Amino acid sequence: MNRQAQAAVMFLLGGALLHAGTTDLYLRYVKSGLRPLVLAAGVVLVVAALATVWYEWKRAHGGGGHPEPGVAWLLVLPVLALILIAPPALGSYSAVRTGTALQPPYGLDPLPASDPVRLSVVDYASRAAYTHSLRGRTVRVTGFLALDAHGTPYLARMALNCCAADAQPVKIGLTGRLPPILRPDAWLEVTGVYASRVTRDPVNNGPIPYLRVTSALPVATPADPYDETWNK
């Protein structure tokens, strides 16, 4: 691969990162707070590509040069993957095969006075498993549906520390008025009341609190499918 080809590959990769960073595509790979770094990486690659073209032009007019390593063509693979293959967010398959990441919370914000209280999956699970702050309250939580090997329904969300590679699920067991058809990976906005029941995750023995459902409505997949509540 000559330097012109290397510059083209860097330019394509930089452009792909800029495209991902200026749309919601980057949320399939990293948490929302890393958008500036994604954009910065794209800019650096585009600038490096243009600098390479300029350097090669000067060298061509001045003579000399060395053969370039053919292995550089491997740079094409991540470019093609990023441009042509937009992977879906991790969902029910990963959730039921990975133990819950729920941990005791360091601190929780006061709840608003009016019901229903809109909570994230992580927030509801933390309060239900480790406090009594939800007794008598009506809550509204959004997540995707997951069914374990026994058909037990969970409302889940994959929680991120940094990127999709370290995503782990937080699960809420569902009871009460469930939809007649339970389809894994369907996104639901669930309204319900606190249930004191807590079971153990069969994968890692972590706590899975329950929510008694009063209504469940299908909703579109959110722009950011991951839950970053626990590391904000």
Image (tube, helix red, strand yellow):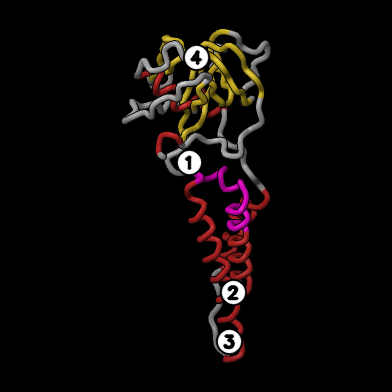
Q: Can residue 154 be seen in this view?
A: yes
Q: N-terminal of the two: label 3 or label 2?
A: 2
Q: What residue type is labelled 2?
A: Leu
CB within 8 Å, label 4 to label 2: no
Instruction: Say which of marks 4 and 2 sits in front.
Output: 4
> Is residue 222 shown above or below 218?
below
Instruction: Say which of marks 4 and 3 sits in front.
Output: 4
Q: Residue furthest left?
A: 106
Q: Residue 50 carries which label?
A: 2
Q: N-terminal of the two: label 1 or label 3?
A: 3
Please give the name of the residue rendered at 61% of the width and 54% of the height, measured from the top-left corner. Answer: 22
SS at badge 1: helix
CB within 8 Å, label 4 to label 3: no
Can residue 20 be found in the magenta stretch? yes
Magenta-tinted stretch = 16-32
Instruction: Say which of marks 1 and 4 sits in front.
Output: 4
The residue carrying mark 3 is 58
> Where's residue 136, x and y in %?
45, 11
Q: Which residue lies furthest to the bottom in this view?
A: 62
Q: N-terminal of the two: label 1 or label 2?
A: 2
Give the CA separation, mark 1 to mark 4.
29 Å
The residue carrying mark 4 is 211
Q: Which amino acid does label 4 sit on?
A: Leu
Q: Can residue 205 be seen in this view?
A: no
